Structure formats: structure tokens, C-alpha cells
Image (cartoon, grey):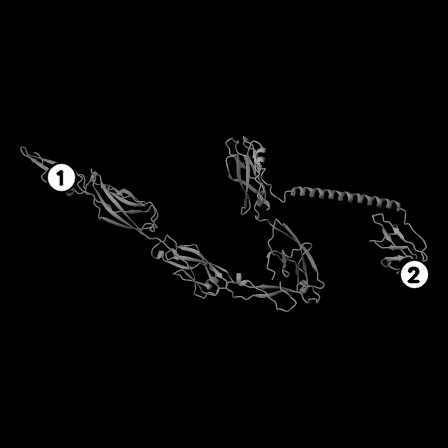
């Protein structure tokens, strides 16, 4: 009754993927005769490898595909069933893809590539991956397939110029077709996406397109029209590079073309003002005409030399043009020549002719030379504007020019004196505690405001740990207590900087001696000859001058006060003595010469009128029987007698009333 295997059983051949796999049979038993049914289950063993349909797989994926995209892969087949069938897939390591293993309804497995990092064809054109299929046997059986991924180009790169700005120069008489510049751009894409076309930017002026031509394939910029330096000295040309993709990428650059001047313009002489006729007795140096000479060329081509014909009584003087700083403008309601205005700079007490000038026609004020804020901060002048009528009418206006400060003066050290030949040193005693002020660097800056703020910094020192300097006051302090082993002589270099732009600086050297007694230092300096400083008595002279000026001012004020008081008392007494009426001084005069009266009166008297509202008396001479005006009486009346002489001069500014 033993059931034996007659031949090798192949479960996959008998049942395929059917599970469980069983064989049914019947057994007949005799004596007694009986029929039995039997079933044999064929169990699977892991005797088959997973198999892919092909040994290689090829995918084409665009670099524009976004992360997260999925790509199904062909599945491997394993005839085994159960745990011995295909269980999972594995993917070789790479930075872009991951593997997602899915399970179908029937329990079979399949794999999908998942894009985790976007592809960049310009970095990597293709990828080679290995997909492995594994069953669940022990040991597991596997199969491999090579996956070749071609990265398809997308127009994800715009053209790029090798430089953003190109510079070139060309002479203004350059013929058409001359190469000016060659621009170049590159595109990392392939095919049409990487083909570049050059062109002018949309906002390029039409004038530039008329003067320059651009080759769309090579990027060569050439002269097309006639350039003129006097018209335009610099062209700023904007160009672009565009690829041929469906959505083309664009790059921009600019070309700066400098037009070089050539001497193609003759000087022009313009008469801006003429003074004519000229009197024959005009003094030498009288201005006859103002001429303007211009040359549209530049640099040396624009420099001119002016000459006049020889043998004529005139000379030429070529004033250089100045810098315009102000425009004085006036209006005149008249018409024609009566409204023609001319501007003149009145020199006044101070001559500014070498510093300022004004355009006679338009009132533009020019500065002719450099101004120095430290020399003079403000200039005040008077400008006169005059019309062309007869007689001419004029108006004056005051103009003030303020000179702003520039940082053109470095700090100047006053102490220690930078030019002295003496070797005097500041003295500090041993054991001096920290924080003790030893000396001070004194400096000034001729500039003003922020440009004159000085900061002090310790630049070098024999022992940097021993002394410190105040940042804003220049005071030198001991940074720590002096010790016995400290050097006896110290040299400090102090850096002084202002706060201007640009920063100007200077340095001062300070010598400090560490000694117990000042006498020791003086003994060492007995052989040093004092410097012959011509300004050593300047302070004494300044103090003496201040004292003398103050004394003179005080004496002057005192004298003026005494004189005013005396005049006031004298006027008061005269007023009190003449309050009643006028007084007369009659008397006979003989042989009187009445110069303009035309008569000889028997008697003559004069009256003195004293006004009550003035400290100055008005003297009025009256002559009887005359009708001449007062002005004709001002003169001299002489007596015929020798030695008698009266001079009466009218000084009244008004006539007194009869009551006065």
C-alpha cells in the first residue's frame, strides 16, 4: 500500500501559477472490493529565478518634468508561488530617482520610478540605473535589468553674454563698415533651443539704428552712418541675444561706443558786445569789444590761439571761460531797445575782477579761479542791470557768494612742535599710578565743521601697554602703574586724523622720560642748544597788541563822551541866554561894498536866529531894501575901513518862522 514517486515532479509544469497544486487519484482495494479517493499536494520549492522581459530598458525623460513624476517599469516574472515568488524590487543609488513598489489585486508586485530631483540636461545628459527583482526564497533568487535614461533637452536656459558691458572707441570720421565691437553669448541648451540670434533691443533709438549695424549671426557691430563727435560723444547701445526655442530665452547687454574727436571744425569768433564809438582820448586799456572764440572740437583740437592785425592801436587780451555759479535775471516792461538789458558787475571797494565775471547779455555769473574757504568764506558784490533806453535806467542787486569748505587741510600739530631741533621730553616719575595725565598733543585743522574734527590714535610706542591717548582730546595718560623695570625713555607716535572725505592725517612724536627728579632730565639737556625759533615771542607780542588796542579804544570812547557832554552843556547855556527874542547889533558902516545889492544903505544890521529844536544855530544875513533871493545874499561884505572884515555864510537847511 505504499505510494511512491514514479518520476521528478515539476510543480510549475503541472499547475503553473495555480496554488495550491494537487494531484487526485483513486485506489481500488480487493477482498473486500473497495474504492478510495486520494489527493497529493505538490509543494513549491524556490527553484526558479525572477526573469525580466529584456536585459535593458530605455527611457526618455524631459528635463522640464517636475519632481514627483512617475514612470512605470516592466515587471519581472517568477514561476514560483507563495513566498518563493517575486517579492520586491531594488534600485541602484542615484540623486534623482526613487523606487516605489506597488501590489496588484492578485498580489503581484510592480515598480515605478519616482522623480525626486529635477533633471538638468546641462549637468548630466544621461543616467544609467540598475533595477533588481528579488523573490522570497532562502537564499533569495534575483534578476537584473539595465535602465538607460536619456535626458531630453528643454529650453530652460536663456542665452548669457560673456560680459554685460562692452566698451569701444571709434573716430568720428570712420568709414562705413568699420568693425566697432563683437558681442558674444552662449546657450547651454541643444538644437534650436541653443541657437542664438543677435538684435537691437526694442527701445534702441532709430538714430542709433541708422548709425550702426549688427550682424544677427556673428554679433559684429559695425559703423553704418556718419558719426559726429560734436553731435554725440558717447553712444549707449542696448543689444539682445535670443534663442530659437518655442518660448525663447533672451539676454541683454550694452555697448558703450566713445566717439573720438578729430580736428574737423574751424574756430568761430563771435562779437558778444561792442563799445563804439571810442573817444580819441580814451585811456590805454579801455575795453573796446568783447569777443568769444569757440571751437567745437575737444582737447587739443579745441585749443585756439588768437591774433590781431599788427600796426593798429589795439591789443588783444584771451580771458579764460569760468564756471557758471549763478544767473541774475531781470525783466523790463518796455519794448524794443528800451527793454534790452545788459548786466555789469560793480567792483565796489574790493576788486573781484580776477575772481568773478558776469555775462553782459544773459547775467550769468562766473567764478574764474579756485576759491579758498580758509581765505574768505563769503564774497559780496553788486550787480547792475541797465536797459538800452535814453537816458538809460538801471537797478542794482546785491549778490553774496558763500564758499563751502572742502577737506583740503591736514591736521597741524602745535605741540610738540614738529619742526623743533630740541630733544626736550615730558617727565613722569616712577611709580606713577594708572590714569595720570603725562602730556597732551595739541593740534588744529584749518578746515571747518566736520572736516576739522580731529581724532588721536596711538600708532607706535616703546611699550604699548604703558600709555594711552584720548581719542578726541589728545591727552596722554598712563595706562598702568609705572614699574621699576620699565624703560627710562619712551617714544610715542600719535596719529592725528580728521573726519573729512577723504581723510587727511599727520603724526606727532612725543618723548617721555621716566625719572625720579626733573633735575636729572635738565642735566641731560644742558648741552642741547635751544632752537632758533623766530616766533618764540609771538605770544608776548600778541598780548601787548591786545593791551594797546584795548587802551586806545577805551581812551577814544572816554574822549568822545567828554566832548559830547561839553557840547551839550554849551548848547544848553546858549539856549537859556537867547530864549527871549533875537538880538541886534546896529552900528554905522561907511564905504560898504554891497557886491550884489546895488545900493549903499545908511545903516546895516544882521540878525542871528536861534532855533529851539536844534543844537546848531542858523545864521541869516538880512539887508534892507533888497528883493534879491536869499541865495544871492550868500557872499562876503567888506567894510571900507582897514582891518574890519565880516564873512557871513548861509548854512540854513530851512527858514525860521517869524515866531522863532
Residue 97's image quarter? Answer: top left
Residue 395's image quarter? Answer: bottom right
How many numbered circles does the render carry? 2
Can residue 104 be spotted in the picture?
A: no
Name the residue that disc number 2 marks. Answer: 599
Identify the residue shown where x is 69% and y is 54%.
Answer: 349
Q: Secondary structure at mark 1?
A: strand
Q: Quadrant of the N terminus?
A: top left
Can residue 229 be spotted in the picture?
A: yes
Name the residue that disc number 1 marks. Answer: 23
Within-10-Å neighbours for mark 1: few <14, some 14–19, many 20+: few
Closest to the camera, between mark 1 and mark 2, is 2
Residue 92's image quarter? Answer: top left
Judge left or right: residue 486 versus residue 329: left
Identify the residue shown where x is 55% and y is 62%.
Answer: 303
Judge left or right: residue 412 versus residue 78: right
Q: Position of residue 377 (x, y in %)?
A: 63, 49
Q: Secondary structure at mark 2?
A: loop
Within-10-Å neighbours for mark 2: few <14, some 14–19, many 20+: few
Judge left or right: residue 623 versus residue 60: right
Depth check, front residue: 172 or 337 = 172
Depth check, front residue: 619 or 56 = 619
Q: Position of residue 495 (x, y in %)?
A: 53, 42
- N-term-proximal mark, 1 vs 2: 1
Q: Position of residue 152 (x, y in %)?
A: 32, 52
Q: What's the CA distance linking mark 1 and mark 2? A: 186 Å
Q: Is residue 315 above or below residue 133?
A: below
Q: Position of residue 607 (x, y in %)?
A: 89, 52
Judged from this view, the residue extending furthest toward the front is 527
Q: Are marks 1 and 2 in contact (CB under 8 Å)?
A: no
Amino acid at each position: 500500500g505504499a505510494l511512491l514517486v514514479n518520476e521528478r515532479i515539476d510543480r510549475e509544469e503541472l499547475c503553473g501559477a495555480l496554488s495550491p497544486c494537487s494531484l487526485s487519484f483513486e485506489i481500488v482495494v480487493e477482498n473486500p472490493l473497495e474504492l478510495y479517493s486520494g489527493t497529493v499536494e505538490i509543494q513549491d520549492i524556490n527553484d526558479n529565478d525572477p526573469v525580466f522581459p529584456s536585459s535593458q530598458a530605455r527611457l526618455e525623460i524631459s528635463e522640464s518634468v517636475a519632481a514627483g513624476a512617475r514612470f512605470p517599469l516592466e515587471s519581472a516574472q517568477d514561476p514560483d508561488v507563495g513566498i518563493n515568488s517575486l517579492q520586491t524590487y531594488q534600485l541602484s543609488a542615484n540623486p534623482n530617482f526613487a523606487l516605489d513598489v506597488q501590489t496588484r489585486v492578485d498580489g503581484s508586485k510592480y515598480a515605478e520610478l519616482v522623480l525626486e530631483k529635477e533633471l538638468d540636461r546641462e549637468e548630466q545628459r544621461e543616467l544609467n540605473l540598475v533595477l533588481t527583482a528579488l523573490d522570497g526564497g532562502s537564499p533569495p533568487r534575483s534578476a537584473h535589468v539595465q535602465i538607460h535614461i536619456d535626458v531630453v533637452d528643454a529650453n530652460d536656459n536663456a542665452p548669457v553674454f560673456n560680459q554685460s558691458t562692452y566698451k569701444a572707441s571709434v573716430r568720428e570720421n570712420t568709414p562705413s563698415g568699420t568693425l566697432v565691437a563683437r558681442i558674444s553669448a552662449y546657450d547651454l541648451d541643444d538644437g534650436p533651443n541653443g541657437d542664438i540670434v543677435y538684435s537691437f533691443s526694442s527701445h534702441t533709438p532709430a538714430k542709433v539704428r541708422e548709425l550702426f549695424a549688427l550682424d544677427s549671426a556673428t554679433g559684429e557691430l559695425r559703423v553704418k552712418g556718419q558719426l559726429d563727435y560734436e553731435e554725440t560723444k558717447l553712444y549707449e547701445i542696448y543689444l539682445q541675444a535670443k534663442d530659437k526655442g518655442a518660448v525663447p530665452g533672451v539676454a541683454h547687454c550694452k555697448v558703450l561706443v566713445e566717439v573720438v574727436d578729430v580736428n574737423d571744425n574751424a574756430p568761430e569768433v563771435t562779437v558778444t558786445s561792442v563799445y563804439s564809438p571810442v573817444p580819441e582820448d580814451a585811456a590805454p586799456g579801455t575795453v573796446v569789444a568783447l569777443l568769444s572764440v569757440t571751437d567745437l572740437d575737444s582737447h587739443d583740437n579745441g585749443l585756439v590761439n588768437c591774433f590781431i592785425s599788427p600796426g593798429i592801436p589795439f591789443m588783444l587780451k584771451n580771458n579764460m571761460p569760468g564756471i557758471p555759479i549763478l544767473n541774475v535775471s531781470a525783466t523790463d516792461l518796455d519794448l524794443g531797445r528800451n527793454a534790452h538789458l545788459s548786466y555789469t558787475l560793480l567792483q565796489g571797494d574790493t576788486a573781484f575782477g580776477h575772481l568773478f565775471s558776469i555775462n553782459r547779455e544773459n547775467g550769468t555769473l562766473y567764478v574764474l579761479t579756485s576759491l579758498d574757504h580758509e581765505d574768505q568764506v563769503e564774497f559780496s558784490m553788486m550787480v547792475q542791470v541797465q536797459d538800452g533806453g535814453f537816458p538809460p535806467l538801471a537797478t542794482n542787486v546785491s549778490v553774496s557768494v558763500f564758499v563751502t569748505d572742502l577737506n583740503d587741510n591736514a591736521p597741524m600739530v602745535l605741540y610738540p612742535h614738529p619742526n623743533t631741533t630740541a630733544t626736550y621730553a615730558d617727565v613722569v616719575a616712577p611709580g606713577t599710578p594708572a590714569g595720570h595725565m603725562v602730556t597732551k598733543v595739541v593740534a588744529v585743522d584749518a578746515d571747518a565743521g566736520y572736516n576739522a574734527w580731529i581724532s588721536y590714535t596711538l600708532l607706535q610706542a616703546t611699550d604699548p601697554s604703558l600709555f594711552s591717548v584720548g581719542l578726541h582730546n589728545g591727552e596722554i595718560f598712563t595706562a598702568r602703574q609705572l614699574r621699576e623695570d620699565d624703560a627710562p625713555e619712551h617714544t610715542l607716535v600719535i596719529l592725528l586724523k580728521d573726519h573729512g572725505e577723504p581723510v587727511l592725517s599727520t603724526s606727532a612724536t612725543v618723548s617721555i622720560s621716566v625719572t625720579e627728579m626733573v633735575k636729572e632730565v635738565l642735566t641731560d639737556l644742558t648741552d642741547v642748544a635751544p632752537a632758533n625759533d623766530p616766533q618764540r615771542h609771538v605770544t608776548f607780542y600778541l598780548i601787548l597788541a591786545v593791551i594797546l588796542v584795548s587802551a586806545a579804544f577805551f581812551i577814544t570812547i572816554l574822549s568822545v563822551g567828554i566832548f559830547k557832554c561839553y557840547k551839550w552843556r554849551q548848547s544848553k547855556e546858549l539856549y537859556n541866554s537867547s530864549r527871549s527874542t533875537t538880538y541886534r547889533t546896529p552900528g554905522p558902516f561907511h564905504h560898504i561894498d554891497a557886491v550884489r545889492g546895488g545900493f549903499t544903505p545908511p545903516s546895516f544890521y544882521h540878525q542871528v536866529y536861534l532855533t529851539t529844536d536844534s543844537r546848531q544855530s542858523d545864521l541869516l544875513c538880512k539887508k534892507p531894501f533888497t528883493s534879491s533871493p536869499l541865495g544871492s545874499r550868500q557872499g562876503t561884505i567888506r567894510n571900507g575901513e582897514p582891518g574890519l572884515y565880516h564873512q557871513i555864510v548861509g548854512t540854513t537847511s530851512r527858514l525860521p518862522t517869524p515866531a522863532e
